[in-house]
Image: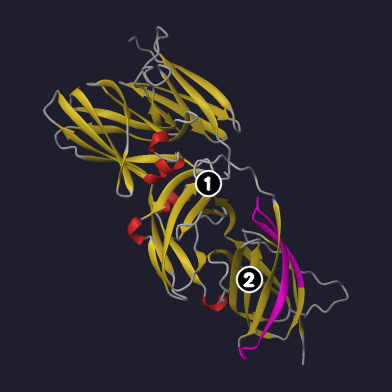
Amino acid sequence: MKQSIFMMKCLLLLAIFSGCYQPLPHENDNIPRICFEYHLTGMLMQDIKAPGLKNPGAQRSIDYGSGQLTVIHAGSGTEEVYSWYFTVDVDTFEMTSEKTIVLSPGTYHFLFDLPIHNYQYAGSVTDVVIVDGENSVPVTVRPVIGDTTIAIDLEELASLRFAYPPEEIAILEFPRLGYILDGNNEMILFFNPATGVTDTYIVLEPGAHTLQLKLYDGNTQKGKSVPLQETINVVPARNITMDIVPLYGETAFELTMDGGEALFAFTIPAEIVEEVDGTENLTTYFMLYGFNNGLREEEITYYPSGTEYKGEVLLEQFHYDTVTITLTFIDQRNLETIGACGKDEIVLDMNTRNVVLPLVLYRRALITGHLMGVVGVFVVDADRKPVEGVSVYSDEVLAGLTGSGVFGTAGYLKVYLVKGEHQVKVMKDGYEMVQSFVMDTMGISNIEFVLDMTL
């Protein structure tokens, strides 16, 4: 019976890579040659043991694994298992593996079980017809999250699928997924930027479990799972779909007559408090600026309310206005900014009740895909007096308001940015200026704006 040589010696890349074995001149060109085009969607590379930890440092760039390849003949159902050795570059998601096996021509299913340390990865490709000559077969390899003590049934693996706004996923430069399973430590799954946020496999004992998800871009949290979906019922081979919603804060208003009292009630997600290990370590600065009300600055104290936290600010003699509102979250132990949220052009009148504020949270315990630098933005008028209540934008995104000096330097705002070219814009009462600059890795820069106005 004619035998086929199944030769695997190729580079496993996230993008399609064609590196099939090439026969020597004296070899038979009709011998079937197969190269797998591997797509590794992500890697499990970090266990966060406690919130508020500093970056523990980079992990080693090359890892080694020893797994197995199961080959099943589609017609007879007979199978053979082969040892599979490989290396992985965790910086580039690049895997290298070499193996030669002998197969008869026909149709096959290939199942990969590839553990690295205590983490598992799996992939499969079915109904592959091996013919004479060169064969190129794409295979998607995904991380397996869940209980590593359970034997994986590769033919009945369930997928964990994510539902998240496509426009939000498309802009993630370094996508990460944090998950907390049954109250254990948060695990961080690093997605390959080339594939973005994709399905992953999940292995758990059948029955009820809790699963919380957090979506990151580098070390910046962008989204979270919906609490009502975090209790899941696991059934073998049944896929699980969970929604991920953008991270946000919310403010509700109670406004009386024009020129009366205004009560601002803020709701923030628990992740902010968890990052500083409790409300006693959290300082929040509220800032509001509008033409009719000027700059208002207050400190907010939060208290628990269900799965979230709430705080209030009461402003006297408040007038209807179009305003910019920002919240800045500070770790009081080291005075480090851990996050911010805000929104501009909010119309406050008798019809205003609730406003959602986009929120940015920096998770300092994550190994980041980039290291952020800081730029100090200082705004003065024509007489070089500091200007308070200036809206500062980084790359068209509201970064905050310059203060009066109550909570820092007057006319100043600190902005965190990744390496690369950026635009910073300042606006107040019809005055506007823009500057471009290049931020270095972990760089520290200062920009001054001189507005053509006199206070």
Query: Is disc 2 in contact with disc 1, using a CB cutoff of under 8 Å?
Result: no
User: 257 or 397, which is in the foreground?
Assistant: 257
Name the residue that disc number 2 marks. 113
The answer to whether any part of residue 397 appears in the image is: no
Residue type at tag 2? Asp
Residue at figure coordinates x 36%, y 22% from the top left: 390
Q: Main secondary structure of the magenta part?
A: strand
| Residue neighbourhood size for the residue with mark 2, other residues' Cα within 10 Å, grouped as few (<14), some (14–19), many (≥20) | many
For marks 2 and 1, the one nearer the N-term is 2
Residue projecting furthest to the left: 257
User: 22 or 14, which is in the foreground?
Assistant: 14
**In the image, is 415 to the left or to the right of 127?**
left
In this rendering, the answer to whether 58 lies above or below 96 is above
Residue 126 percent across, percent down from the top left: 58, 78
Q: Secondary structure at mark 2?
A: strand
The answer to whether any part of residue 178 appears in the image is: yes
Residue projecting furthest to the right: 26
User: 26 or 411, which is in the foreground?
Assistant: 411
Q: For residue 454, what is the image quadrant?
A: top left
Residue at figure coordinates x 40%, y 24% from the top left: 426
In this rendering, the answer to whether 102 lies above or below 68 is below
Q: For residue 387, what is the image quadrant?
A: top left
Residue 173 - label: 1
Residue stretch rendered in magenta on the structure: 75-99
> Split into 4 quadrants, where in the image is the C terminus?
top left
Residue 264 percent across, percent down from the top left: 24, 33
